Amino acid sequence: MLRNAHGMSQEEVAEKIDISRQAYAKWEAGMTVPDIEKCRRLADLYGVTIDGLIRSETIDGKETILPAPRGKNIWGSVTVNERGQLVIPKALREKFGLTGGQRLIVLSEDMEGIALVPAEIFEAKMKKAMEYASARQEE
């Protein structure tokens, strides 16, 4: 999937990571697996983490999706209940230290989706932006 998404042939990928096309073809066919160094090269080439390279995510257990770019995450899917509530996946809550009663800022981009940001992080970034804007006005 990653190779196709990047519009590359097996030969192009093999050349970029310094292996034979046949070796790469065997990886894609599931006949062999790359060693950790080749995984690192592939991950760098595709701009993903090694974890993203070797672990596949699905949408509702059906359709496999591309791994997120390095520094980004896909946490799975959630279902909004009849009251408009959703449960944030446990791994996500643990990674960001989210606890009951914590305030989150809800951001969106028209027709793109929503993002949840802990209020203290959002407010600190807004304060910094306002300070920067004030300093620029004084110049």
Image: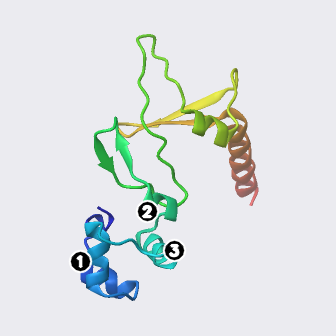
Name the amino acid, label 2: Leu
Q: Which of 25/46 is in front?
A: 25
Name the amino acid, label 3: Ile
Above or below — where is 1 with respect to 106? below
Whichever of callouts 3 and 2 sits on the residue coming sooner in the sequence is 3
Q: At which x and y percent is residue 6?
A: 30, 69
Which label sits on residue 53? 2
Camera-nearest label, 1 or 3: 3
Whichever of callouts 1 and 2 sits on the residue coming sooner in the sequence is 1
Q: Which residue is mark 3?
A: 36
| Quadrant of the rendered image containing residue 34 | bottom left
Counting other residues with Cα less than 10 Å from the Cα at mark 1, is it few (<14), some (14-19), or many (20 or more)?
A: few
Counting other residues with Cα less than 10 Å from the Cα at mark 2, is it few (<14), some (14-19), or many (20 or more)?
A: some
**SS for dot 2:** helix
| Quadrant of the rendered image containing residue 32 | bottom left
**SS for dot 3:** helix
Q: Which residue is mark 1?
A: 9
Q: Which of 73/134 is in front?
A: 73
Whichever of callouts 1 and 3 sits on the residue coming sooner in the sequence is 1
Q: Are marks 1 and 3 in contact (CB under 8 Å)?
A: no
Which label sits on residue 50? none
| Quadrant of the rendered image containing residue 61 | top left
Above or below — where is 85 with respect to 106? above
**Is any part of residue 49 visible from this angle?**
no
How much space separates mark 3 and mark 2, taking CA atoms? Answer: 11 Å
What is the residue that sits farthest to the front in this orientation?
31
Task: Tell me which residue sits at (31%, 88%) in the image.
Answer: 20
Camera-nearest label, 3 or 2: 3
How much space separates mark 1 and mark 2, taking CA atoms? Answer: 18 Å
